[in-house]
Image (tube, rainbow, N blue to C red):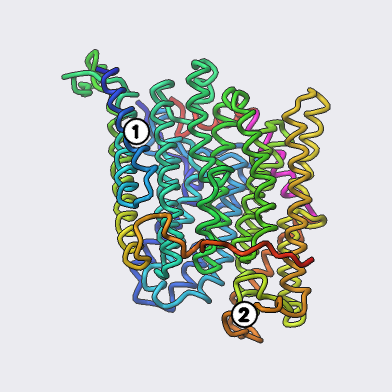
Amino acid sequence: MQSLPTPPGQWLVLLPVLIPLAGAALLLLLRQMKLLQLPLAVLIAAVTALCDFVLVMRVAESGPQAMTMGNWLPPFGIAFTVDALGAGFAFAAALVVTIVLLPLGADAPDRARRDGLYPQVLLLLAGVSGAFVTGDLFNLYVWFEVMLIASFGLLALGRQPMQLDGTVKYGFPNFMATSIFLLALGLLYGLMGTLNMADLIGASARADKAALAAIAALLLVGFGMKAAGFPLNTWLAASYHTPPPAIAALLAALLTKVGAYALIRSLAMVLPDARVMLEPALAVVAVATLTLGPLAAIAETGLRRLIGFLLIGGIGAMLAGLALGTEQGLAGAASYGIHAMLALGALYVIAGLVEKLTGAGDTRAMGGLLAMSPLIAMVFGLALFAVAGVPPLSGFWPKFLLVTAGIDRWLATGDMTALALWLAVLLNALLSLIAVARLFAHVAWRAAPLPGFAPQGPRQVMLTSREERMVLWPAALLVMGLVGLGLWPEPIMGFGMATAKALLDPAAYIAATQLAGGSP
Amino acid sequence: MNAAMAVLAGLFLSAGIYLLLSRALIRMLLGLLLFGNGVNLVILVAGRLSRGVPPIALDGKLPLAGAANPLPQALILTAIVIGFALFSFLLVLAYRAYQSLDADDTNEMRVAEPKGGPEPPLSY
């Protein structure tokens, strides 16, 4: 057939997966060298982030990059194809893992380290990166499972009864979600005879519309459950507050975004006709997620559970962008994903610090943070208001895109769905603002806990210098990123617009995949 | 044969979902197992079944007419291995949860989300 060697540049596409995967194996081999584990893990994650950055630059310069395994031409070989969306998300994910590894290392008990904490974090990164760079739907399923098994391990690490409970509630629905995804894949293969994304784009235009809609609905259920879209999001509220804060930061930053990414990739790019057919369902899910997330956050008193509900509201924003389906809408969804990864990672880490200082996990027993440590209160507040989308922080711009997309589509077509989505995004912004303002007032502003609520644990008056270095500064770095992206939104907005253009016109993506590994 | 296998896959899936609706962890696990096997059958049927012709091609020739489709088999093999790993983890997890929470009914597992949650904060 053909035996051209793979050009060296194409290996770059593989590196974001290969490096953390090999790194996880290396750390397992070196498990006796306890002092080396954390620095090595940070180094490996940082190198991955660097590769992702180079990839982002290459994609921006010369369009989607592809690499085909074993030189089997697509659609027979498994292709890794990276476009702007995949590269950007992979870069943000690796960056967050690099930074959050520090607080993870500061907090982790010896037992967790012995049980393979760092290899599992790197495996999680490998799974997430794999999901972002793959160009094959079955391969996407494999990366989902890699990610899933690593997240199971991370959630249960430490084996507290609460964690076991959380892991059970997390494990069953997520395993079910990937099974439903696999079911959809089987049917899709039966209908189209291919699972390569670039190949599917062409084939889906000719396929039977009714069958396509049914398969896309299964994909929506599977990915929607992963992304924590209403009504399949109760697992998130039941599990994300149970592990140590830094682990929750990792999971919150990465996992649901992969679900939302898979929805955007499969519905907006691969099966665009099915997205149009599913639009009413998508809109209902998006509106419900947008409003119910922050409403639950207003009613919640557990700090980390509350953040979980804010996270769910953010997923609603990404779903709204997908439901709008216009260039601006998709741009809003993609840029919101990047913002949410950074913001949620920071917020969970700081929440851990706040719980330490106030000696409580319940907001009613908190208070006086501002007097205790103005710096931490400020970092906490900035992260909170970024999540709520208050200008000039980074959460504002993606929501601005979504609001303009909604109103533009409504004015152009008079479409009631667009109007509902527009209203829901605005309502979400208002409710989130109420939720975070009340939270900040309760935790930082109020001088003392509510009468009758004493902190359960001891209050730690000062952070140790190790905690400052390994927990506060990394979190502050992420928050500075949020402020920076808010004041200079060009990178994140440009990323969003480029991504949306590429998703709506996948010709370059197809071309990159077909030519991968040499010409036939 | 394709139709019969499709019906069989449907039976597997529905039995799996029925068991998953239970609140006992062991039943749910069995439900996941059945559901996963049903999905594997769906993939097998999706590749269209045929009998007795192996998918082997001689050098430079096309495979025989009516040869079995090897791709679904490769997909299923992967899915079985992955599913087995996850299932084993969930099995151990269910046992550990039973030991430390003293419950195999998901309604009784209320450590992470205690019953009778607090009222929403009323200040501010």
Residue A181 seen in the current view? yes
Closer to us: A342 or B13: B13
Residue A464 is left or right of residue B89, and the answer is right
The disc at residue B13 is 1
The x, y position of residue A396, in whole percent, is 78, 51
**Marked residue chain, label 2:** A
Q: Nearer the viewer, mark 1 or mark 2?
A: 2
Residue B42 is left or right of residue A38, and the answer is left
Closer to us: A392 or A361: A361
The disc at residue A455 is 2
**Tag 1 secondary structure:** helix
Residue A46 seen in the current view? no
**Is residue A398 placed above or below A221 in the rendered structure?**
below
Q: Amino acid at mark 1?
A: Leu
Closer to us: A389 or A424: A424
Quadrant the C terminus of chain A occupies = top left
Identity of the residue furthest to the left in this view: B52
* Helix, strand or loop: magenta stretch: helix
**Marked residue chain, label 1:** B
Q: Residues within 10 Å of mark 2 (few under 14, many from 20)?
A: some
Q: Residue at x 64, y 80 (%)?
A: A454
Q: How many marks?
A: 2
Find the magenta span and give its range.
Answer: A488-504
Q: Amino acid at mark 2?
A: Pro
Residue A506, quarter of picture: top right
Separation (CA) of disc 1 from disc 2: 49 Å
The x, y position of residue A231, in whole percent, is 56, 42
